[in-house]
Structures are given as C-alpha cells and as structure tokens.
Image (tube, rainbow, N blue to C red):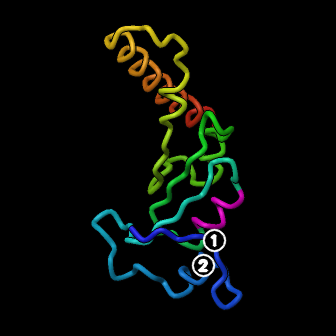
Amino acid sequence: MLALVEISLRATPCRRCCSETNYGKHSLGKNGYSCIGAVVGATFPSEGQKLRTLMPNAIILAPGVGSQGGTIKNLLINFGQEIKGVIIPVSRAITYNISDLTISLGKYQAIIRENVENFVSNLELVKNVER
C-alpha cells in the first residue's frame, strides 16, 4: 500500500492530487479498494469525511481510538455505519490498561480476550444506537 503524507505538491494537498488523478483505479481488488491508502486519525472526524469523499476506494488507517481520545462515534461520523475499508488499530486500548505486571500468562490472555470482546460489543452498541 502506498502511504500518503499530507504534503503539498504544486500547492495542492497530496490527498486531493491523488483523488483527482484517480491513482489506484487500475489496481482495484475484488472488494473495490485500491492500492492507495491514507492515515486519518479517529480524533479528526471532519478530515475523515473529506478524505473518504475524495478517495472512496482507499483503504484508510484510523488510529487514535481509545488511549488517544478517538471514539467509535467519530469513526461512524467519518466512515458511516459499516466502517468499510477502514483499519482501526486499538492495540494500546486493549493491551496497555493492565497495571499488575505479575499476573500469569493465562490471566493476561484472559484480560486481552475480555478487552477485545468489550471493544467489539461497544462497536456494535454504538452502531445500533446511531441507526
């Protein structure tokens, strides 16, 4: 995946340049996404909406949910109810909230599993409330 950085190219933001020239149109996969991708923080809902409009076939990495203050609700604002074509890394929210460093591996695995299940439940709950 080609990662794009918000830089100016002839005074035009890179994201706009890529969308106007339709980079990646010849590399659409079976699910309709291209090899062009972007990173948009979950803490910036308006930027996510703009980018999805400009680059409807891009895979988007949306970091910042949990520890950095981004919310599932922001992701729904950015990308709609289905949140398709979006990768949501939540590793810090799942693994870093364990304060007891002396717990067993089994206990650690159980906590991680519970945190993942809670994240999925919260995602589904928010999606259902927003409908």
Q: Is residue 4 left or right of residue 46?
A: left
x, y percentage for residue 13?
66, 79
Image vertical order of residue 33 relative to residue 121, above or below = below
Q: In this view, does 75 lie to the left or right of 27?
A: right
Of residues 25 and 94, the one drawn nearer to the viewer in this rendering = 94
Report the amino acid beneath label 1: Glu
Instruction: Identify residue for label 1.
Output: 6
User: Which quadrant of the figure has residue 39?
Assistant: bottom right
Q: What stretch is highlighted in magenta?
A: 46-52
Labels 1 & 2 near each other (Cβ < 8 A): yes
Residue at the limit of the structure toward the bottom, as seen here: 10
**Disc 2 target residue:** 14
Q: Is residue 109 above or below residue 125?
A: above
Image location of residue 90, percent across then percent down = 50, 37
Examine the residues drawn in magenta and state their main secondary structure: helix
- Of residues 112 and 34, which is closer to you in this image? 112
Judge whether 67 appears above or below 106 on screen: below
Q: Residue at x 47, y 66 (%)?
A: 37
Q: Which residue lies furthest to the left in this view?
A: 30
**Residue at (37% x, 14% y) in the render:** 110
